[in-house]
Image (cartoon, rainbow, N blue to C red):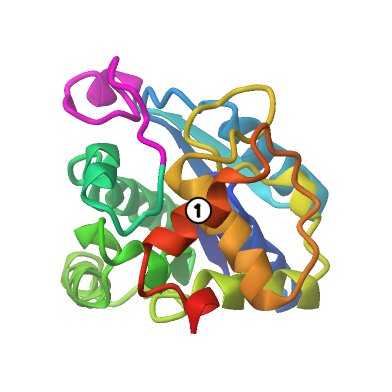
Amino acid sequence: MKTYLICSGGLDSVTLAYRLAHEKSLQGIISFDYGQRHKKELFFAKECARALGADYYPIDISAIGKNLSGSSLTDNIDVPDGYYAEDNMKSTVVPNRNAVFLSIAFAIASAKHGDSVAIAVHGGDHFIYADCRENFINAFNAMEQLSLEGQCQLFAPYVSCDKSDIVKDGVKYNVPFTKTWSCYKGGEHHCGRCGTCVERREAFALAGVDDPTIYEDNEFWIEAVKRNKNSKLLK
C-alpha cells in the first residue's frame, strides 16, 4: 500500500502521518501554499516528512488562493476568536479548499502509482466546513473512482471522530505534538484564542493528555468552551 497524505503540518494531519508510517503505508506528504496567513504551518509539514522519511511535495497554488476571496485565512480580515461552533467562524471558510487539495493529491498519487490519498478531516470540522463532512468525502471518493478507474481510494479515518480521539492516536503513535501547528494567526506562538487553538486545548483536555503547546493566552479557551453548550467538557 502506497499512501499520499495531504498534510498541513497541524495536529490532525501530522498524527495521521505517524499512524500511516507505523502501518508502513506512508509514501509521500503533500502540502499546499494557498496564500494562507498561517503559512508557517508548511514548515511543520516539511519537518514531518523529513522525520518520517517520506517524499515531500510542496504545492504552490497561491495564485489560485488570491482569487478565493472572502476568507479571514487569506484576506485582510481579522481571524475571529472563539469556539469553532460559532457563526463568526464561518469567515475562516476557504471556498472549495478540500476539493482543490484532493483533486491535486489524487493526480499526484495516480502519477506516482499510489494506492490511496489520505486526509485528516474530523468530526469537529463538520459544523463550519461542508467539505469535511462524511457525505462530501464519500462523494469525492466515488468521483475519483470514475476519474481514475478505481486506482486510488480516499482514506479519511477520522471523519467521524472527535479531535480528542486524534490526540489519543497521537499518544499511541508517539507524535511530537510540539512539532505541529494549528493556530490560524501564524504568530510566534499559538495565540490561544482562535477557533483552532480553542479546539486544540479542548481536545487535549478531553483526551486527558497534557498539552505541551505554548499559547500566548492560556485562559481564553475556558470561557470559549463554556459558551458552547455542546462541549463534552461540560457534560
Q: Is 26 situated above or below 91?
A: below
Q: Name the quarter where the N terminus is drawn.
A: bottom right
Q: How many marks?
A: 1
Instruction: Report whether 81 appears left or right of 44.
Output: left
Residue 185 in the image: state x and y as whole percent. Answer: 49, 28
* Quadrant housing residue 145: bottom left
Is residue 156 or residue 224 the one in the foreground? 224
Is residue 88 or residue 75 the one in the foreground? 88
Residue 51 in the image: state x and y as whole percent. Answer: 81, 49
Residue 193 in the image: state x and y as whole percent. Answer: 51, 39
Q: Is 105 situated above or below 139?
A: above
Residue 107 shows in this picture: yes
Residue 222 lies in the magenta stretch: no
Which residue is painted at 29% across and 39% down in the image?
Answer: 92
* Quadrant housing residue 20: bottom right
The residue to which callout 1 is attached is 223
Tell me which secondary structure the magenta stretch mostly adopts. loop
Q: Amino acid at mark 1?
A: Glu
Residue 69 lies in the magenta stretch: yes
Instruction: Report whether 1 appears left or right of 51.
Output: left
**Farthest residue in the top direction?**
76
Residue 161 in the image: state x and y as whole percent. Answer: 46, 80
Is residue 23 or residue 95 the one in the foreground? 95
Which residue is painted at 50% across and 41% down in the image?
Answer: 31
Boundaries of the magenta span: 62-81
Residue 7 shows in this picture: no
* Quadrant housing residue 78: top left
Is residue 131 or residue 111 the one in the foreground? 131
Q: Is 195 situated above or below 66?
A: below
Instruction: Sort mark 1 into few (<14), some (14-19) or many (20+) by Cα contacts within 10 Å.
Output: few
Which residue is painted at 70% across and 52% down in the image?
Answer: 54
Which residue is painted at 51% across and 57% down in the image?
Answer: 199
